[in-house]
Amino acid sequence: MERFTLALDEGWEIRVSARSDVGCVRENNEDFFGVFSTGDPARGALLVVADGMGGAAAGEVASRLAVETTHEQFFRSPPTTDPATALRSALEIANRVIHSRARSEPRLAGMGTTCTAVAVRDRRLWHAHVGDSRAYLVHASGIRQITRDHSLAAEIERTGGTHVAGVENILTRCLGPEPLVELETGEETSPLESGMRIVLCSDGLTNQVEDGEIHQLVSMRGPEGACGRLVDLARERGAPDNVTVVVAEVARIRPA
């Protein structure tokens, strides 16, 4: 488990654990994640999950490039940059990097990846994402998905259409296939409180574990235990896809 100070003068930190598992069917793990900080509380922390797709090892390449480029570009932005702007720019650059790499190497043609990134600074949270990897905010009374799935199934549901079998895993947008990508960004308007949890995960988890179960398990355990139990539960249910989970707990380390 890693600990990152969020605001040195207020005595807040987040405690973060992550776990990625190949699942019960796949031979390769095309998920990739990262948990990052510069060590400067003023810069906060960055959490990223990506779920790659493509032939051969292309999905693994795409997800790794997404996480590594997002990390590099986010912290390259000046400290005064609005985190939402920095996240958007980082993911847009990651998209160009992946797209260019796929065009230059035939074996990687058509590769793409989801990418969900959360920045936490001074008890504030911002996110940017594309695809169907999710970010949740968990508190004692409930769980709230703060990202919106970019999948055909989700689009049909949002427009009031009838569920169509077999479209659950069809993405409507992701990083890589096109030179430009439409991203979504968001910001939590209320400060994070002690005991809140942030969860990032690939659809290998959410296809097997319900939101209510995520809430219960994350609320009852610390980040490390929650990650382990969520992955284990997905595996107990067959885990046909790779499963990746990042759990961060907000904590006060000094009294007010």
Image (spheres, rainbow, N blue to C red):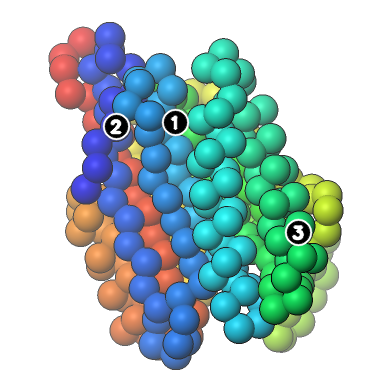
User: Identity of the amino acid at label 3?
Assistant: His
Q: What residue type is labelled 1?
A: Val
Q: Do the residues labelled 3 and 2 touch (CB within 8 Å)?
A: no
Q: Mark 1 points at which residue?
A: 120
- Element at label 3: helix
The residue indicated by pointer 3 is: 99
Quadrant containing the C terminus in the rendered view: top left
Please name whichever residue, 22 or 151, is drawn nearer the observer in this view of the structure. Answer: 22
Q: Distance between the residues labelled 1 and 2?
A: 10 Å
Nearer-N-terminus badge (3/2): 2
Look at mark 2 in the image and give the residue it sits on: 4
Residue 60 in percent (x, y) is at 54, 70
Using the rendered view, name the quadrant where residue 205 is placed: bottom left
Farthest residue, direction front = 104
State if disc 2 and disc 1 touch (CB < 8 Å). Answer: yes
Look at 66% across and 82% down and name the residue there.
Answer: 55
State which quadrant residue 133 falls in: bottom right
- At mark 1, the secondary structure is strand
8 relative to 83, above or below = above
For marks 3 and 2, give the one nearer the viewer: 3
The residue nearer to you, when weighing 44 against 214, is 44
Could you classify mark 1 by the number of other residues whose Cα lies within 10 Å: few (under 14), some (14-19), or many (20 or more)? Answer: many
Say what amino acid the circle numbered 2 marks.
Phe
The location of residue 139, given as percent across then percent down, is: 36, 41
Label 1 or label 2, whichever lies nearer to me, is 2
Task: Tell me: 70 left or right of 198.
Answer: right
Q: Is residue 34 left or right of residue 147?
A: left
